[in-house]
Image (spheres, helix red, strand yellow):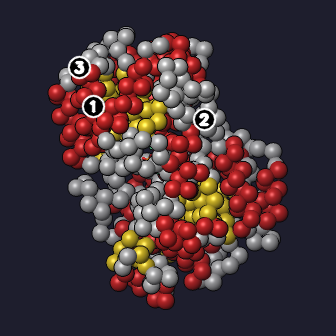
Amino acid sequence: MRPRVLLVASEAIPLVKTGGLADVITALAGALHEKNIEVSIFLPGYPSALAGATALAKVAVLDDLPGGPACLYRGRMPDSKIPVILLETESFRVRSGNPYVDANGDEYPDNAVSFAALCHAAVRICAARTPLAAPHIVHANDWHAGLIPLLLRSNDIKQIGSVLTIHNLAFQGNYPIELGPSLGIPADLLNPDGIELWGKLSFLKAGIQYADRISIVSESYAREVLTPQFGNGLDGILNHRKQAIVAISNGIDMRLWNPAKDPLIARHFTQRTLRNKNFCKQDLLAMFKLPADPFAPLLALGSRITHQKMADVALAALPAILDKYPRMQVVVLGRGERAYEDGFIELSRRYPGRLGVHIGYEERLAHALHAGADMLLHGTRFEPYGLTPIYSMRYGTIPIASRVGGLIDTIIDAGTGSTPCKGANGILFDGEQAADMIAAVDRAFKMFGNSDHWLTMQRNAMSGDFSWHDPVRKYVEMYSEIASAAAKPLFAAALSAKSCRLPDLAVARR
Ligand code: ADP
Ligand code: GLC
């Protein structure tokens, strides 16, 4: 028998994605599968998920979940052997755009009940109350799945180990405490010793309180969340549960983000054929309708356009940067808060031919951006891990990023001297002011001016190992620690088993 893991989340590429969580869930599932673990991804049945999953079949009707009756479907992730389970409810079925907010950016009023339903359904699977095989470990991700460890406990299910992975502490799923009974939360847990947080009930706090292990997606963020500055009001409870916290860095899908094979970029390249990156640059400029200038440095911004990602700071810094470096060109790809989006559109009008903006969410453009730019500007007030700068490094695009969270662990700063420090693959900066960002861009430009130094940094960036190799081993070790006595040997065997390879994902489909 193989060990079974149920990976519960709200996003997984290519079915539904708003950020890095989606990349991580699918890549982690693939890496666990290669470790011979029987992993299933459990997601809400959003329209895109129901349409994209293959070989879907209805396996159960659950008629007593919060929010009303629901159907469980089982199928496979597209172009993959990984099973996916989808919970179709009346509320998930109509979420055809963003899964959390409506067209005006307002949170759906039924989010609490919808994600509570997802958690209850996961616990039904754990309790073997559906035709699906119960897992040995249930692995909940972010607040959407946060009630699962609590519900395992209130349903007295002891034989299944539970993990909560925190990808972003800023999103907590906090709702009026009066909703508790309608979400199936026992009344005796609706207090500060249970899941109350500042007068509300908190899905994320529920996960933190009751999961067997809390994993956090980088070493540095795992330290930061224990402080009031980064703890988002949960640092107290996280300190209380410190013994259960494990830092496990993410990896990236090295096959999907590979300049030597990526079907979404204009020309393939490696460290040895870096000159081909220039074709990707021309392609990117053309996509943004900017004129080609072979000597102009190209700076890219590609992320959610939000306060977290310092969109306000970038908007204040970019005019000064563009004025200071008259040949520089800038491309911006992102979507997020309306006022910031408008700010970037306004900048593109102010700097025609020099700054191009695409407001939207496009996987193909993201690949083109990482492949074609010289530098990636990635200011951020906090960053649990930060996949984006790693993708850029894979393509020899040097990140200029905030010195926070996972970025501290993955980016080696070039320093302030005239030659880059040993192993440098980027620029890190402190502070949240425009001046801090401008000074960091200045440092990058100094390095860019010396082609030998730049090439050294590009090669360092491209040779980093950000694979899932180590992270997945740590996950399996953690599963093994919290598995029931009967399941422990199964995980131990998986750790020592030879990998079974997955076929390459068909990237072009995305
Ligand atoms: P976060 O999860 O906080 O948004 P990450 O950098 O870890 O940050 O992950 C962001 C993911 O979302 C990356 O895969 C990035 O390429 C992608 N992404 C962000 N904005 C866009 C966009 N506008 N179009 C396409 N992909 C995007
Ligand atoms: C979150 C974080 C990001 C991380 C991603 C995947 O969205 O903001 O830093 O890389 O999750 O774990």
Residue type, label 1? Leu
Q: Secondary structure at mark 1?
A: helix
Around disc 1, counting alpha carbons within 10 Å, would you say few (fewer than 14), some (14 to 19), or many (20 or more)?
A: some
Residue 489 pos. (x, y %): 83, 63
Query: Which quadrant would residue 196 be assigned to in this image?
Result: bottom left
Q: Is residue 216 left or right of residue 201?
A: right
Does label 3 or label 1 sit earlier along the sequence?
1
* Residue lying at the far front of the rendered structure: 417
Residue 131 pos. (x, y %): 63, 71
Q: Is residue 170 shown above or below 33? A: below
Q: Residue at x 81, y 58 (%)?
A: 492
Q: What is the distance, in whole Å, between disc 1 and disc 2 at their CAs? A: 32 Å
Residue type, label 2? Met
Q: Nearer the viewer, mark 3 or mark 2?
A: 3
Contact? badges 3 and 1 (CB < 8 Å): no
Q: Is residue 267 shown above or below 29? A: above
Around disc 3, counting alpha carbons within 10 Å, would you say few (fewer than 14), some (14 to 19), or many (20 or more)?
A: some
Q: What is the distance, in whole Å, between disc 3 and disc 1 at their CAs? A: 15 Å
The answer to which of 413 and 266 lies nearer the viewer is 413
Residue type, label 3? Gly
Residue 436 pos. (x, y %): 35, 37
The residue that disc 3 covers is: 353
The residue that disc 2 covers is: 254
Q: Is residue 271 shown above or below 152? A: above
The answer to which of 2 and 440 lies nearer the viewer is 440
Q: Secondary structure at mark 3?
A: loop
The tag on residue 318 is: 1
Q: Residue at x 37, y 76 (%)?
A: 198
